[in-house]
Image (cartoon, rainbow, N blue to C red):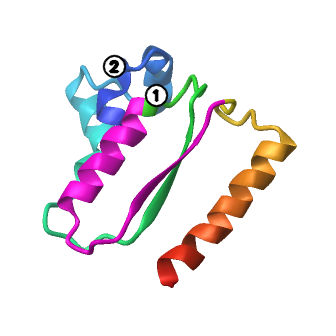
Amino acid sequence: MNPVRLLAGANGANQVAELGDPRTALGLKAVAAMDPYQRIHQGTRYPAIMLAVGLNDSRVPTWESGKFGARLRAASTSGQPVWFRTNADAGHFNDSLDDAAAEWADEAAFPEHVLH
């Protein structure tokens, strides 16, 4: 959600080889180009969004989703919701079948709620 700040995460250093090193000019350019947080523009009509957050995710710190959602909500003029779907047991691709089914149900319910 914010690769420019990847080194602030506990697992950030492990991602430098994959994403780029923001401490170098070339690496910063690479991560900035893919950084959705940096692409949020004030006064834009953003759609409703639901961010799924696994509280045990070792690759994506939970604060990144929180920071992104808060910035999106503050910048948007649409009045559409920014929801956070948290799972205390989930991490990076380690959901149980029950967790996956619950997430699918929430993903199906979200557009229905927004469109009503």
For this view, does 7 lie left or right of residue 14? left
Residue labelled with disc 2 = 8
Residue 35 among those drawn in magenta: no
Q: Quadrant of the N terminus?
A: top left
Front-most of residues 74 and 43 = 74
Q: Is residue 17 visible?
A: yes
Residue under the point 57% across and 68% down: 110
The range drawn in magenta is 63-88
Q: Is residue 35 visible?
A: no
Report if the CB atoms under discs 2 and 1 are less than 8 Å apart. Answer: yes
For this view, does 107 lie left or right of residue 2? right
Compared to 66, does 71 lie above or below? Answer: below
List x then y, in percent, for residue 43.
13, 68
For this view, does 29 lie left or right of residue 34? left
Compared to 28, does 68 lie above or below? Answer: below
In which quarter of the view is residue 99 placed? top right
In which quarter of the view is residue 48 placed? bottom left
Residue 61 circle label: 1
Residue 84 among those drawn in magenta: yes
Tag 2: amino acid: Ala
Instruction: Tell me the crowding category of disc 1: few under 14, some 14 to 19, or many 20 or more residues within 10 angstroms, Cα based.
Output: many
Residue 69 circle label: none
Front-most of residues 46 and 98 = 98
State the SS at label 2: helix
List x then y, in percent, for residue 108.
67, 69
Q: Hey, which residue is sitting farthest left in the picture?
A: 43
List x then y, in percent, for residue 41.
18, 60
